Amino acid sequence: MNIRVLTGITTSGTPHLGNYAGAIRPAVQASAQPGVDAFFFMADYHALIKCDDPARVARSRLEIAATWLAVGLDHERVTFYRQSDIPEIPELTWLLNCVTAKGLMNRAHAYKASVDQNTEKGLEPDDGVTMGLFSYPVLMAADIVMFNANKVPVGRDQIQHLEMARDIAQRFNHLYGRDYFTLPEVVIEEDVATLPGLDGRKMSKSYNNTIPLFEGGASALRAAVMRIVTDSRAPGAPKDAENSHLYTIYRAFATHEQAAALRKQLEEGMGWGEAKQALYDHLENLLAPMREKYFDLIANPGRIEDILQAGAAKARKLATPFMQELRQAVGLRNLQAAQAPSAQPKKEKGKGARFVSFRDDDGSFRFRLLGADGEELLLSQRFADPKEAGALMRRLQSEPAETVLQADGQGYSAMIDGVAVATAPAGAQDGSGASLVRARAALSSLSQE
Ligand code: TRP
């Protein structure tokens, strides 16, 4: 099975060059590797925690989506979606909230920082702290475990959130007695340098030292590059390339040879003005074709919307059945399925044939195939692992009903790889074959959906 790599981007700002070098570029590269199923999403519910300006949130979602697509994210291959298009995520957040210790959240760095600042200012410890901020890590855990991600590439500031996600997932698994959730591993990209900003500190919106990626076009890019702080050595004087952030920025976007060449020129006395021009030319060369795509997408938001809707549908193919399973796990079950397994499900009209999964009294996972009129047509074996039951349910729908459902003795069975994974319930074993015909019809109606 492929490794699932998942990461989210909070949609509260405009992507800058530092985001590109530190997060976007490595993620897009990683997603193109074989053996990887990548999930990238826009954490727009998280954005609401930081930002109560609707126009800003809306604009940022557009800009970030356009950026990822413009830099070459293969949205056919990657699952690319918006958090707020997946209603299962807030639903799962609630289930996780109910198993998360408040004390664990009290220890979150972001929350503690707010409390410390308040205390310093002599304010109430929780002044200005919303429940959104406080429970931020629970929503993030839901983002991750909803898709059973194996690896989560993030910045260092997110390591604690990943540890909390593991804690919460483990707690849920323990309480409900199965490994519903994969425990995610944090991935810190060691060789991705954090890009310095204009003043040499980490490039960040909060330091107001960023170089724009696309917004503002070539002129804004040039203006920012010209504002990079350098030392005062005059043209002709040898420069200390290694310790200049202009060179560090250049190197992040250049080949070894290109970087070595600029370094040599600086050491031989190239003026800072000339070096800035070289950096600008280099960046412009790299960014211009992507920028063109970016503005083309921004001008056609409907195209982005379509891509994101398709991404949400793809993500929900996983999230919807999994959430169903999790609801079962915590006891939010169909009342009929909560009855003894031998009880006949009440007939329901007009819903079409369907599978229903349930948890048996002994804790095992099972499912039934019901006909459109609610007639029970198959009852599965008992499975210890809900994922196995889920996978078999999907297999049954993906194979031709005539081969899967085979008559045996008085009844019939559903055969997968030579094993009877489900059999006709007692009531359908009349030996006439009529139930088998109905069961096949029900199963094939599902596979045609
Ligand atoms: N908190 C992350 C950040 O600020 C964004 C994020 C939200 C995220 N949900 C996630 C990252 C899930 C990885 C996985 O960078």
Image (cartoon, grey):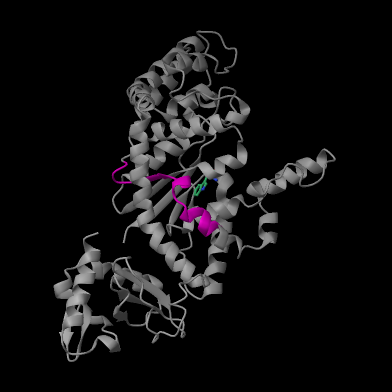
Quadrant (top left/top right/bottom left/bottom right) for the C terminus: bottom left
Residue 69 on image: x %, y %:
35, 34
Q: Who's the residue at 40% across and 25% down the image?
A: 259
The correct choice, above or below, for 289 with respect to 162 in the image is above
Q: Residue at x 25, y 85 (%)?
A: 428
Horizontal and vertical percent for residue 447?
22, 64
Residue 32 lies in the magenta-colored region: no
Check the image and name the residue furthest to the bottom: 409
Query: Residue 68: in sight, yes or no?
Result: yes
Apparent side of residue 151 relative to residue 404 in the rendered image (left or right)? right
Q: Quadrant of residue 168?
A: bottom right
Question: Would you say 373 lies left or right of 106 here?
Answer: left
Q: Can residue 268 be seen in the rendering of this structure?
A: no
Q: Give the extent of the magenta segment.
A: 75-93
The quadrant where residue 356 appears: bottom left
Quadrant housing the N terminus: bottom left
Q: Residue furthest right?
A: 122
x and y, in percent, of residue 61 in the image:
47, 35
The answer to which image quadrant residue 96 occupies is bottom right
Q: Left or right: where does residue 220 sit relative to residue 115?
A: left
Query: Is residue 77 located in the magenta-colored stretch of the structure?
Result: yes
Closest to the observer: 199 or 361?
Answer: 361
Vertically, is 20 above or below 443? above
